[in-house]
Image (cartoon, rainbow, N blue to C red):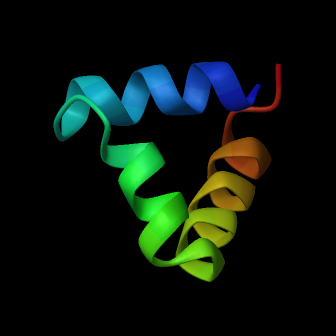
Amino acid sequence: MIEIFIELTNQIFWEGYAEQLAASNPTAFQMELAEFTDCYNL
């Protein structure tokens, strides 16, 4: 699921967005990932 989240955010924002967010603000990254997972649980 995390791979899909990273791919989607790279398409919406820019290449490397998820990795940059994870490095600069891990709490925000986890919150966005949790929201994505809750909404799009496959």
Instruction: Please give the name of the residue rendered at 45% of the width and 20% of the height, measured from the top-left corner.
Output: 7
Query: Along the line of sight, which residue is nearer the eye, 35 or 20?
Result: 20
Question: Against 9, is 23 above or below?
Answer: below
Query: Along the line of sight, which residue is nearer the eye, 10 or 20?
Result: 20
Q: Is residue 40 rendered to the left or right of residue 25?
A: right
The image quarter containing residue 9 is top left
Residue 16 position within the rendered picture, expressed as x and y whole percent measured from the top left: 31, 36
Instruction: Please give the name of the residue rendered at 43% of the width and 74% of the height, measured from the top-left corner.
Output: 24
Determine the residue located farthest toward the front in the rendered image: 23
Q: Quadrant of the C terminus?
A: top right
Residue 18 position within the rendered picture, expressed as x and y whole percent measured from the top left: 44, 46
Q: Is residue 34 rendered to the left or right of residue 23?
A: right
The image quarter containing residue 3 is top right
Residue 1 position within the rendered picture, expressed as x and y whole percent measured from the top left: 76, 25
Question: Against 23, is 42 above or below?
Answer: above
The image quarter containing residue 28 is bottom right
Residue 20 position within the rendered picture, expressed as x and y whole percent measured from the top left: 37, 55
Query: Along the line of sight, which residue is nearer the eye, 6 or 24?
Result: 24
Determine the residue located farthest toward the left in the rendered image: 14
So how many labels did they put on this image? Answer: 0
Instruction: Please give the name of the residue rendered at 17% of the width and 35% of the height, measured from the top-left corner.
Output: 14
Instruction: Please give the name of the residue rendered at 69% of the width and 66% of the height, measured from the top-left corner.
Output: 30
